[in-house]
Image: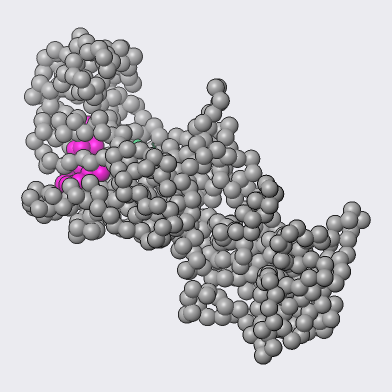
Amino acid sequence: MNSEATPGTAPVESTGEPTTKSNFLRDAIIQDLATGKHGGRVQTRFPPEPNGYLHIGHAKAICLDFGLADEFGGKTNLRFDDTNPTKEETEYVEAIMEDVRWLGFEWDGLFYASDYFQQLYEWAIKLIKDGKAYVCDLTADQTREYRGTLTEPGKDSPYRNRSIAENLDLFERMKNGEFADGSRTLRAKIDMASPNLSFRDPVMYRILHQHHHRTGDAWCIYPMYDYAHGQSDSIEQVTHSICTLEFDNNRHLYNWFIEQLGIFPSQQFEFDRLSLTYTVMSKRKLLRLVQEGLVSGWNDPRMPTLSGMRRRGYTPEAIRDFCASLGVSKTNGITQLQQLEYYVRQHLNKHAQRVMAVLKPLKVVLTNYPDDLVEEMEAVNNPEDASAGTRKIPFSKVLYIEQDDFREVPPPKYYRLSPGKEVRLRYGYIIKCESVVKDADGNVVEVHCTYDPDSRSGGATSNRKVKATIHWVSAAHALDAEVRMYDTLFAKENPDDVEEGQDFIANLNPNSLEVLTAKVEPSLKDAAAGARYQFERMGYFCVDPDSTPGKLVFNRTIGLKDTWAKIEQRAQNA
Ligand code: ATP
Ligand code: MG
């Protein structure tokens, strides 16, 4: 549910099925196909800057870029927008490729804006020769001053009317490394009085003596975004160049360069950026979290990055369904995190293998159960998928149940285990609490129960009903596992909502990670990193890459919808 209602946004948990709704991007493509604008061809691109890992916002862009092209039999390139050597790294390039593939997309062409540095340079020379670009010696501060404001026109640079010959000479010398960083720029000669500030002689090239992750030291002048992006699209014959709304202003300049150069007429379309509650989505902010050690890395399971979500156990299908549910609009809104979580639950519910795991163990001794008997209980792997089959779980005299499933003094409507009361053990027997053992501080450390031998699940006499069924593991057979329980990384819906003098870091949730030592059923012994499970009644969990055969580690992906917690909450508030 978007707090600012955006057209075409699916209400959360309405039908549960994402839809391919009509939107202005599709409509534009359909229109262009109808008029034969690009010879019936659809070509898109996804153009990340390799200065960080992809996040869920990028997933929206990826799903649109690849999804729209797929829908109309078109192609999609992956192009790294690597024009800023100071922040870009090969590590990011590799991570981005991995994440796009994980999300389920394969690009047609793989390109880098840096592939086009020579062509862009030659086009710059052409613009100089046409009298449409000049070398300017103003400093960055002066350039800003001369630019004017929204209400005031700018002033012409004193270098604006250099001769073509002088411009060609200076530009070549800029390229040859004769000048210091920041001492000169190449600027387009457009209109210092234009109401569109981006038309006031925008900078095309700056001097930067910086090693580039791909071109090394071949260049010491680098093209600006506005000079590189449209032409890169054009070189690749991109028909529909889709980007977020903040580029609305850049569209005119995008068209201007293409028109001046007389090259393939790529066209830009803008859509709304995804923002989610309880997280931040700017790479600059995510980088800070990583650099300051506030998370374990870009793939920390609390991060909104695709690698974090993968590690947490989110599925690519769920993320794609979520993106499809978002709709496309011309105004930025805020999407509730619960909308994403809804699709994660939907998908995991259908596909995750069920197992039993006790997160906060309490020992239960069945006093009338034979000491050495071990029974094999048959358990269903996935009630949503008959083909998933069944497995056997050992049952014995000493078990663990959740601490929460026992109350010495039960509150009203508490139907789980308490003194004198009965409960069913899933796939097992009905047990009755007879007594408790306490430690010196009065905490219950062991619960003594009797079991009803005639009540075995699935048995001939098993139809006796009790109000609650709880999960368990056999103490002698269970494995220890580290379980990392996550909450939102930020405590506030909008992490940028801060007091004077603070920034988003102040809103970090101090309780976003709790580590438990759980007892899990023995079938999990060889669970592989990335495997996803439903721990019955407790939620969805995924094996962390830190996991080893000797030491299992799980991440909680997300809880089940916990109606009991809500009832309890209401009771407490009443
Ligand atoms: P950031 O501001 O986080 O650094 P960016 O927009 O600079 O993000 P890029 O790597 O340049 O990141 O983005 C690649 C593509 O992904 C662009 O087309 C951009 O519009 C799109 N994109 C980035 N963030 C979002 C978002 N939150 N929602 C939708 N699309 C996004
Ligand atoms: Mg960017």
Q: Is residue 78 visible?
A: no
Would residue 86 be found to the left or right of residue 28 on screen?
right
Ligand 1: give its quadrant: top left
Bounds of the magenta segment:
227-242
Is 236 colored magenta in this rendering?
yes
Name which residue lies at 69% across and 88% down: 461
Of residues 27 and 246, the one nearer the viewer is 27
Residue 135 screen position, x and y as percent = 20, 18
Q: Is residue 356 visible?
A: yes
Of residues 11 and 535, the one nearer the viewer is 11
102, above or below 418, in the image: above
Name which residue lies at 34% across and 14% down: 141
Would residue 132 be found to the left or right of residue 313 on screen?
left
Quadrant in which residue 209 is drawn? top left
Is 264 colored magenta in this rendering?
no
| Residue ranking furthest to the right | 440
Name which residue lies at 26% across and 14% down: 151
Residue 570 screen position, x and y as percent = 65, 51
Residue 435 screen position, x and y as percent = 87, 69
